[in-house]
Each structure stands twice: as C-alpha cells, then as structure tokens.
C-alpha cells in the first residue's frame, strides 16, 4: 500500500457510459484527496468524455472507444496501439480500472501493463496473474450486491484512498445557469421563477423505458403543481418529446436536442423535481441535488439515485434483476405495471420536502452544496401494487445472497 500512497500520476479507466463515470466520481475524488499533489487522468469513452469540463476531481480526460465495450462505430487496431503508446509516454505511476461487475478489467489491464504502468488495480473475478498488481475478487451479484458508487469506493479504499464526500460530482458552470434562466424566462413569458418540473422520457436501452403516453399523462396531472414542465431528450428523440408535450398541454416546453450537456445539468439543477427513466439525467440530478422520481426497471439494483431525495418506482416480477438491455417478457411488466397515478403520488410526496428553486440567473447551486450523506431507506407499496423505494440514498449493500 505504501507504493500507492507514493503514486502521483494516476490513470482512472472507466470506458463505458456517462452515468457510469458519474457514479465513479466519489472514488476518483478519494484518489485525488488521498495523496500529495496527485494528478488524475480519466480514460473514458468518447461519449462520456463530454463530461470533461464538469469533473473537478480529474486533471485530464482522454477519449478512447475500446473494442471490448459497445460503441456505435468500430475501432481499429491502430487506435489501440496508439493509445498504448500515449499511455506509455505519460509515465503513469498507477492505474485504477473501474468496471461494472459483468465487465472484465483484463483487456484494459493488458494495455496498462504494455504501457509500463507499474501499479494496476481492479475488481476481477478470474485470476489475473501478472496483469493486475492488486485486485478485489469479484463477488457480485452472487454473494453481495452493492450500489455502484459504494462498489468503486471500496475498490480505492483497498489501497488507502478515502473521502468524507461521497456525493456524485458535476461542476455546473455559471454561464450555463444564466443561459437556462434566460431560456425558461423566454418559454414562460419572461417569468422563470416558481416551480419547474423536468421530464426525461428517453433511455438508451428499451428495457428501461416507461411508455411515452404515461409520461404525458403524469405530466398533465402534475401541471397544476408546477409553473412549467421542461421535457428533455436528444435530437433523435424529438418525436418522443413532442408526443409527451402534446399530452401535457400548454405548460410543456419541448427541449429535445436543444441543450448541451452543461445546460441540461443546469436545467436539472434549476428544477424542483426530475421524473425520468433510469438513465444519465438521474445521476446528474443526484450530483446537483435535485429530487428524483425514477422509473426504475428491475434490470439491476446497483444504479439507483444516490444521496438525493427520491422515489424509485417499479412492479416486482419473478424476472427481477435480469440485467437485460431488451426485455424478453410480454408487456414489459416491471415498468408498464406502474401507473401515471403512482408517478403523480410519488412526485407530490417529494414536493413538500422542497421549496421552489427559482431565482433568475442565480450563480450558486440551491441544494447540492447543502446535501450531506444520509443513511436511511424505506419501502412501501401503493394501492395499485407499485413497489416504491424512498429515501435520500440507496444503502451501500443492497442485498446478500442467502
């Protein structure tokens, strides 16, 4: 462990999606705070590299689309060789390879070894022999299941890296806050104060999507509780966002493809509540302190909202924790069993806990700086049978096998 304490230049490898990187920010913060004058470089996918301006715990972000991770465009062997050479020239003292439990760290470990990085740490199920110098034997999901944040904190703690600040990290920029204040003022007749709801109806995996018409129905009911409802999505989700807005009515503001990542985060920070599928904006909300109603398909339990007031909605099914990107059950029951009324009730459950966020053009976050880790969690069940989990965060250990 003394070698790790002396490590100054550390490579953090997290090659998957933006939400995965956000859930790794507390562990990277622990690495940063646990050594003198440390320099952290994040190696991540080109899509997640868009987070670079907003991660104040790392010094550099390098984009690399690894061939063992799913990407829309295939990479070339030359790109892999070029990255190994770039790593070699950077003279890193150590590398921490962050993966979800189902990913092998060994391809990245091989690259780091070929680049001459002397210390290499990861969770690993199989025997890595010389590819890793330290490892935590992978036991998930068979013997224990933890929140992804807790899992990565445990990884770096094994080499002495700890932090008292376990919140997700996203440094919202002042200019993005001002731009959102102007956008909302223009959308609501020069009045951006009052309560705002953000609805994000999309998700990359079809198994994590609640039906669009239900988002619209829930939004229509919640319109009486909010001064405006911003509906967000990518450029390719314009039809989805338009359909949701049409059901909500005049208070809906369609923003598909209209926001940069920084402005999306500023909007979520400005909002009083986010209603979304389990996808990247949920983790942004956790980072900026905005309460969340999370339509959480029972694909896996590790990625629930972290340390933020929340209600997690689904219907318990025998195929829970399937870890599928595409649901193979007729009717997608774990999500379609959730009614719009359940979402409305969950939203109104959270509303008394928060005051309107609106201050036009504010420069400081309203809630994120005030949130501190809490350790409580509760379950209940609505009359319709929807499973509800509420709390400020998910407990570190979600389940143990018996």
Image: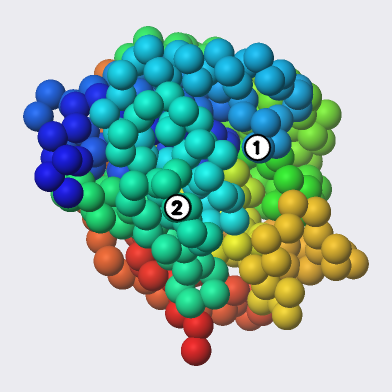
Distance (Cα) linking label 2 and label 1:
23 Å
> Which residue corresponds to mark 2?
129
Position of residue 135 in the picture relative to residue 81 (left or right): left
Query: What residue lies at 64% left-to-right and 68% top-to-bottom?
Result: 321
Query: What residue lies at 70% left-to-right and 66% top-to-bottom?
Result: 322
Relative depth, front residue between 79 and 194: 79
- Whether residue 140 is visible to the viewer of this picture, yes or no, is yes
Coloration of the structure image:
rainbow
Of label 2 and label 1, which has the lower sequence position? 1
Q: Are marks 2 and 1 in contact (CB under 8 Å)?
A: no
- Whether residue 162 is visible to the viewer of this picture, yes or no, is no
What secondary structure is marked by label 1? loop
Instruction: Kindly give the residue lying farthest to the left in the view shown.
Output: 36
Position of residue 180 in the picture relative to residue 202 (left or right): left
Relative depth, front residue between 49 and 112: 112
x, y percent for residue 4: 19, 41
x, y percent for residue 81: 58, 18
x, y percent for residue 16: 57, 37
Position of residue 221 in the picture relative to residue 355 (left or right): right
Query: What residue lies at 31% left-to-right and 69% top-to-bottom?
Result: 376
> Which residue corresponds to mark 1?
69
Relative depth, front residue between 134 and 356: 134
């Amino acid at each position: 462990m003394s070698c790790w304490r002396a490590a100054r230049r550390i490579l953090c490898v997290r090659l998957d999606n933006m939400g995965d990187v956000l859930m790794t920010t507390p562990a990277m913060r622990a690495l940063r705070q646990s050594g003198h004058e440390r320099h952290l470089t994040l190696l991540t996918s080109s899509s997640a590299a868009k987070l670079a301006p907003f991660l104040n715990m790392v010094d550099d972000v390098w984009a690399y689309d690894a061939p063992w991770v799913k990407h829309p465009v295939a990479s070339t062997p030359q790109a892999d060789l070029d990255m190994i050479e770039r790593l070699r020239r950077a003279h890193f003292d150590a590398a921490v390879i962050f993966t979800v439990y189902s990913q092998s760290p060994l391809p990245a470990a091989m690259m780091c070894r070929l680049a001459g990085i002397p210390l290499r740490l990861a969770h690993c199920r199989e025997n890595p022999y010389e590819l890793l110098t330290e490892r935590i034997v992978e036991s998930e999901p068979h013997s224990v299941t933890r929140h992804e944040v807790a899992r990565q904190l445990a990884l770096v703690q094994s080499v002495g890296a700890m932090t008292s600040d376990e919140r997700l990290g996203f440094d919202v920029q002042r200019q993005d806050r001002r731009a959102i204040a102007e956008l909302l003022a223009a959308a609501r007749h020069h009045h951006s104060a009052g309560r705002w709801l953000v609805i994000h109806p999309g998700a990359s995996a079809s198994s994590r999507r609640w039906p669009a018409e239900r988002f619209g129905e829930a939004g229509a009911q919640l319109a009486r509780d909010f001064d405006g409802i911003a509906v967000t999505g990518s450029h390719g989700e314009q039809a989805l966002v338009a359909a949701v807005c049409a059901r909500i009515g005049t208070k809906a503001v369609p923003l598909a493809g209209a926001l940069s990542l920084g402005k999306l985060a500023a909007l979520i920070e400005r909002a009083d509540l986010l209603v979304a599928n389990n996808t990247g904006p949920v983790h942004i909300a956790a980072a900026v302190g905005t309460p969340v109603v999370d339509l959480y398909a029972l694909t896996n339990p590790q990625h629930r909202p972290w340390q933020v007031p929340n209600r997690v909605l689904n219907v318990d099914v025998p195929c829970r924790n399937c870890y599928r990107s595409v649901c193979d059950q007729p009717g997608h029951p774990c999500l379609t069993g959730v009614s719009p009324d359940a979402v409305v009730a969950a939203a109104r459950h959270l509303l008394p806990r928060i005051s309107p966020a609106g201050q036009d053009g504010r420069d400081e976050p309203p809630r994120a700086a005030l949130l501190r880790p809490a350790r409580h969690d509760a379950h209940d069940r609505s009359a319709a049978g929807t499973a509800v989990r509420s709390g400020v965060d998910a407990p570190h250990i979600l389940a143990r096998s018996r």
